[in-house]
Amino acid sequence: MITPDDGRPVVAAFDFDGTLIPGDCLLMLHRQLKGVAGLALDWLHLIAPFQAWVGGSLSTAAFKERYLGVLLRGTTREARSAALGQKLPAAQWRALRPRALARLRWHQAQGHRVVIISASPRALIAPLAARLGVDLLATETSDPLAHGPATPLRLSSANCKGEEKVRRLGAWLDRPLEEISLHAYGDSRGDRQLLEVSTAPHWRSFGPDPLPYPARKPKAAPPGGWIPLLALLLLSLALFGLTGLDPVERLSLQGALGRVMAWLPAIYGILGVAYLGRYWRWRLLLSSAGIGRWGWRDARAWFVGFALTATPGKLGELSRVQQLHRELDYPRPPLVHVFVAERLCDGAAVLLWLALLAPSALRAGLGRLPPTGIGLLLLAGAATLLAAIWIWRRWGGPWQHHLPSGALARACRPAGAVTLGIWACESLILWLLVQVVSPAHTVPIQAAIGTYLLSGSLGMLSTLPGGVGVNEGATILLLARFGVPPSAGLAIAILRRLCTVWSVTGLAVLLGWWRGSREGP
């Protein structure tokens, strides 16, 4: 073995998930065994343990056992053998980071001892480790091929992360780590202790120069920290409610989900364009006050705030003001003005699209008022607005500084035009779902857009969290006018919500949690 000048032997220890490969090999195995649709359905059963794990009441090891049990449930020994022995190692080999593989081969060429040390189960990494010609330290489990109701998969060692990585490495070498020259490669908090005791730490890097784990920053507890947990709870309840469907409805939804999978790139492409438009509108309005600028940090904080918007009575909007003030140091009053301007733009755009594309649906939403009643309603609204303006001008002097600027009012014109495009784009998702889930029933595109907008407006006016129940019920009733049966209408309504507000909320929750876990101690 070649040793450095100080005479100590060299050991190179590589983390696996996120370091040698991007992503997580547990998720890779899940896709190999059950496909994307099966993975999504299995996660419905993992919501409660996932929430307990994020909240700290369930250990990582216990959550991993739960996850493995759900992952392997319903699979045959032959399918597990093929996935673990052939499909997963092949997928991992293709996913190896070129720079990471080059660095690993360099250590081998120098005669260094190379080991993969991972929190993932040994059975998932052992074939690839053998192909690479390296040793392996991982979380030990019972035999996944023997998994069954009578023999559930169990962890037979401590979860190999954090301090356990250091302990396992020292036990494997059978000598103190101070007696070796340790090169450690890692990418997450679970690798911190290993990187800190190494001679040459490589934090998310594969170059010749060491890069230590970043210094830990004290994190003050943010005010209102319960709000993200509330958003996560609301998301969990919405998804968990799907398990309460009767068997026929569940089969219908499962079949619809399978057909929709092929269209997910198109659906999320449309949704991505819509949210780019939302961010563009955000910057148009906020730039009118000279606050912030385009950039990843601004966009990330803005998007993470969507984890808070499904709360009752728009409490989430107020929470977003506090969140953005805390993270970006933006002043609170202009943020409030911008959020109000966004909601006004949304309301005007929805009314305009409904008036153009679905006037009958708009009239139905207003109820069976006679023309005289509608006229009186509009007159009363105008009179109320004029009275409010007069009262403000007469007695509102002390609060004048709370008014939005004229620049914001001018920015509402281009922002309103962008909003029209946002809602037209998002509404296409419902029309596309109708074509995929219920192709036998013809729903004109303008009717599908009107259904999307009207059901969404009714859900918003209900002030329920995310409009749950009201939105879905309105969608089913409106689609029934075109002959779409209730079972298909329910599948369309649920899929529409999963593909829009709940997937965005879930992604925002995960992005906020991931950022905290990567930056935390």
Image: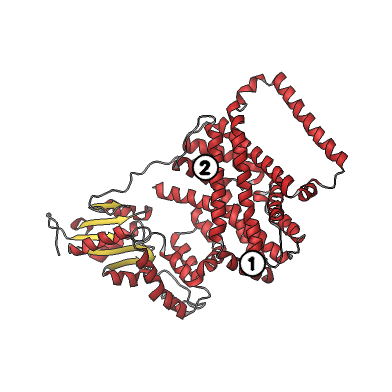
Q: Secondary structure at mark 1?
A: helix
- Residue 41 percent location from the top left of the image: 56, 66
Compared with residue 509, is residue 346 higher up or lower down, i.e. above or below? above
Question: Which residue sits at x=63%, y=61%?
Answer: 433
| Rendered location of residue 297, percent (x, y) | 45, 41
Residue type of the residue flagged with mark 2: Trp
* Label 1, residues with CA under 10 Å away: few <14, some 14-19, many ≥20: many
Give residue 218's position: percent from left, percent from top.
40, 41
Q: Position of residue 285 (x, y in %)?
A: 56, 35
> Quick check: 293 left or right of 274?
left
**Rendered position, 449 above or below 333:** below
**Image quadrant where one finds the N terminus:** bottom left
Q: Which image quadrant is residue 181 in?
A: bottom left
Q: CA distance from mark 1 to mark 2?
A: 32 Å
**289 left or right of 200 in image:** right
Q: Would you say 4 lies left or right of 279 here?
A: left
Q: Tell me, what colour scheme is on the image?
A: secondary structure
Number of callouts? 2
In the drawing, does residue 112 fall left or right of residue 492?
left
> At 80% across and 36% down in the image, what residue appears?
378
* Amino acid type at image mark 1: Leu
Q: Nearer the viewer, residue 365 or 186?
A: 365
The answer, for residue 95, to whether it is visible in the render is yes
Residue ID for mark 2:
302
Considering only order in the chain, which callout, 2 or 1, is on the residue closer to the N terminus? Answer: 1
Which of the 4 image quarters holds residue 497? bottom right
What secondary structure is found at the residue carrying circle 2?
A: helix
Q: For residue 226, say whether it is visible.
A: no
- Residue at horizontal 53 percent and vertical 56 percent from the top: 51
Disc 1 target residue: 253
